[in-house]
Image (tube, rainbow, N blue to C red):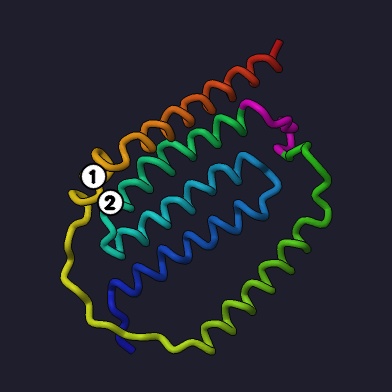
Amino acid sequence: MYMDIKLTIFFMISFITVISAAIVAFSRNIVYSAFALFGVFAGVLGLYILLSADFVAVIQLIIYIGGILVLILFAVMLTTKTDLKSGERKLFNRAMEPFAALIGVGVLGLLLARGMINSEFIVRKVSPYVSTTAYIGDKLLNEYLLPFEIVSLIVVLVLVGAVVIARREVK
């Protein structure tokens, strides 16, 4: 059976993304969870590249991998009470978490399988690739400039607030 190279790459990226997401969800070490989140974000980036969504892929790289992931790592390193020998979180009791997560994933999987079985998928012709970067950039710098700047200021304030809270606890 012949498999297209693009389909093979899709399955490889999807596998890495799902495995990384499972590590994020089930790891007892919060540092491992934070670093496995990089695998999730990188997998989503790869899927955007496969979909020829150039602008969304670059935004995924800059915002999520470059910004949000670094912010999460700072928050994990600065604010959690972690046992240095075992690396386990001391936030709450984690005895029932895997069971609750398995039940949730099972129910969600059944709902998704039911939806896939009962749906008719429409196959359309592939349209030629057209870059959307210029159009989105034009809208972002003209029509949506104020919301863009407000969001950037909020992100900076959150980062400064996290550092202030973390420094206050150190004293």
Main SS type for the magenta part? Answer: loop
Of 116 and 80, the residue lying toward us: 116
SS under mark 2:
helix
Which of discs 2 and 1 lies nearer the camera? The answer is: 1
Q: In percent of the image, x 80 and y 49: which residue is there?
A: 94
Residue 141: quadrant of the picture: top left
Of 147 and 66, the residue lying toward us: 147
Residue 104: quadrant of the picture: bottom right
Residue 85: quadrant of the picture: top right
Tell me: residue 32, above or below residue 157: below
Q: Position of residue 119 (x, y in %)?
A: 49, 87
Quadrant (top left, top right, bottom left, bottom right) of the C terminus = top right
Q: Which residue is mark 1?
A: 137
**Range of the magenta residues?**
78-87
The amino acid beneath tag 2 is Phe
Q: Are marks 2 and 1 in contact (CB under 8 Å)?
A: yes
Q: In percent of the image, x 47 and y 31: which residue is there?
A: 155
Checking the image for residue 55, the label placed there is 2
Q: Give the left or right position of residue 22, taking residue 137 as reference.
A: right
Q: Earlier in the sequence, mark 2 or mark 1?
A: 2
Q: In percent of the image, x 75 and y 32: which residue is there?
A: 83
